[in-house]
Image: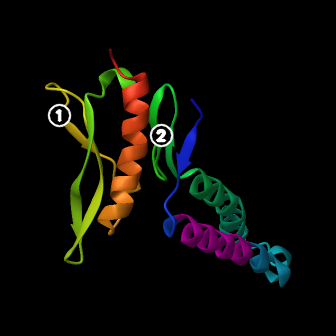
Amino acid sequence: MRRIVIRPRIQVPLLVVLFTVWTLLGVTYFTNGDVLAQRDWFGIALGIMCVVTGPCGIWRALRLGAVIDDTGVRLRNFDSRDDLIPWSSVRSVECAQIDERSGLPLYGPVLDLGDDAGVLPIRLLGSYSRRDAERKAEKLRAFAVSNGPS
C-alpha cells in the first residue's frame, strides 16, 4: 500500500507565515547595526533566538498532520513527539463529533483501540464538515481493513 499524508488546510499555512515573519523580525533586528555596535548582549541573544527558532517552527509546521501507511497511523503534532498507532491495535474506525469549538461541532475520525485503551479521537484530522471528516475516516478504514488483525 502507498503512504497517505493528510495535513490541516488552514493551520499549516498560518503557522508557516507566522514563523516566516518571526524569522524576518530576527533578521531585521540586526540590519540597523546598533545592537551589534553597542554590544547589547540581550538584544543579540533575542535576535539570534528569533532567527534560529523561526526556521525550526516552519519545519515543524510543514511536518504537521497524519501519515497513514502499512505500519499504522502516525500523528505528527506541532509541539510534541510523533505518536504511532499500529494497525494491530485498531479494532475499528468511526467518524464522530470529537469536539466543539465556538458552538460549532468538530467532526473527525475516531479509532477504537479496544477495551484497555478505549477510543482515540484524531483531532489533527478534525473538520467542521461532516462529509470531509467521513472522507478522512474512510481512508483510515481502507488501511485498517487491509492491514489490521485478521
Q: Which colour scheme is used?
A: rainbow
Cα gap from disc 2 to disc 1, whole angstroms: 21 Å
Judging depth in this view, the residue of 101 and 55 nearest the camera is: 101
Left or right: 12 with respect to 90? right
Q: What residue type is labelled 1?
A: Gly
Q: Is the magenta stretch mostly helix, strand or loop?
A: helix
Span of residues in magenta = 12-26
Residue 68 point in image, percent of width and height: 49, 38
Q: Position of residue 34 (x, y in %)?
A: 81, 83
**Which one is nearer the viewer's eye here, 97 or 65?**
97
Residue 38 placement, left or right of 97? right
Residue 2 against residue 63 in the figure, above or below: above
- Residue drawn at x 43%, y 33% is 143
Task: Identify which residue is drawn at 49% across, 67% down.
Answer: 11
Q: Which mark is residue 81?
A: 2
Magenta span has 10? no
Q: Residue drawn at (86%, 77%), measured in percent from left and top?
A: 37
State whether residue 95 is above or below residue 3.
below
Residue 95 visible at all: yes
Camera-side residue of 71 and 138: 138
Mark 2: which amino acid? Answer: Arg
- Callout 2: few (<14), some (14-19), or many (20+) C-alpha neighbours within 10 Å? few
Q: Is residue 74 above or below residue 138?
A: above
Task: Name the residue furthest left.
Answer: 115
Report the residue marked by disc 1. 118
